[in-house]
Amino acid sequence: MSYTFGALPTLGFALPFRNLSFGKWSGALPDQFAYLAGTPTGTHSEYNPGFDLSRACRITDTGVISSASNTLVQYIDLPSYIPNGQVTHVGAAVLSDLGGSYGSGKAVVKLIQVTTGDLASIYNENVASWAIIDGNSTAGINTANGDLGIKFEIRSYNSEADPAGLFDCLMAQHGRTAAERYYAFTHYPDLSGVEITPFTFSVDKRGAGGDLLSYDQTGGAVKWRIKFPFFNVPSAFVEVLNEFWAYSRGLYGPARPIVLTHNLVNVSAAHTTGQDFLHRPPWIICKIVNDELPFQTPAGQFLGADMFDGTLIFEEV
């Protein structure tokens, strides 16, 4: 898979890392992330605007960096439902050349296990506009090791000194079986009914002098909601979507977050200088918020048609 504007959407189960778009940042580092190296190098700072509406993480380092010590990592316990040998898929939005006084960089994102080593590795280098990168794992998850980690770092491109880069919208996912990384839709949603909208948690109030005051106790968090309506789609497709709905709602055990790759971002559009002007993330880590099974009634009036209508509502977690 590679991210292709207008391609069929995909669904996968999100490995439960947190704060992968750096919406939460209350200290020196983004929440949930820590230095990988014992004696870290480089600087790590918030950068606005990010690829999406929330901030990005900027890493800068000094000198020629061939083996990075500026790496940030987040570790989680391996979920009990992951089968041995599970294949995965990883993605990120990166910008690998900030220009100015910085040298060109190589922006690297990896999924790892402490004992097993690298499971997946993706990178982009020497590009001065945002890029969406993604790639498949080259090794399956080893359930004998009880950890998972996602890490990112900046290195030098072509031995240039003082590299810098931006990271945003990290993602790691797996499919419904050990051999599946994600499920690709077999039918498009009805385009005229697709909605992709951000929402915030700001509150507006009038002060004593009549001035309009706005504040947000979350610190400016932005979440996305995506609606996909479907008309006259076959039962085999509906069965898969209903399965993801059931997992998302916790019917088959602990509720699992989902990765929806909507393919509604065009990073190559000339008028955006390489970034979607609406600041849409390339994917959202979400749940399906329909309270009831989305596809219940056969389409039309003839039950034997075995075709269905329904609308899925995805909301970022």
Image (spheres, rainbow, N blue to C red):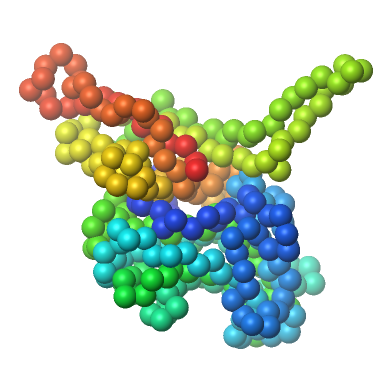
Give the residue at x 72% y 36%: 216
Q: Is residue 298 above or below residue 88?
A: above
Between 58 and 286, the one nearer to me in the picture: 286
Relative placement, left or right, of 305 versus 213 is left
**Residue 86 location in percent, x, y?**
29, 66
Give the residue at x 46% y 47%.
285
- Is residue 98 toward the left or the right of residue 170 in the image? right
Looking at the picture, does residue 260 appear above or below residue 37? Answer: above
**Depicted 107 relative to depicted 297: above or below:** below
> Measured from the top left, where is residue 62 in percent x and y?
75, 80
Residue 274 seen from this side: no
Q: Quadrant of residue 108?
A: bottom right
> Most extreme residue toward the right, as rendered?
209
Residue 287 appears in the rendering? yes
Return the x and y of residue 134 as percentages of the image width and height. Answer: 44, 62
* In front of the other: 117 or 128: 117
Residue found 21% across the figure and 21% down from its top: 297
The residue drawn where x is 49% and y is 41% is 316
Q: Is residue 63 above or below residue 235?
A: below
Residue sitting at the far top: 301
Residue 52 location, x and y as percent? Answer: 60, 47
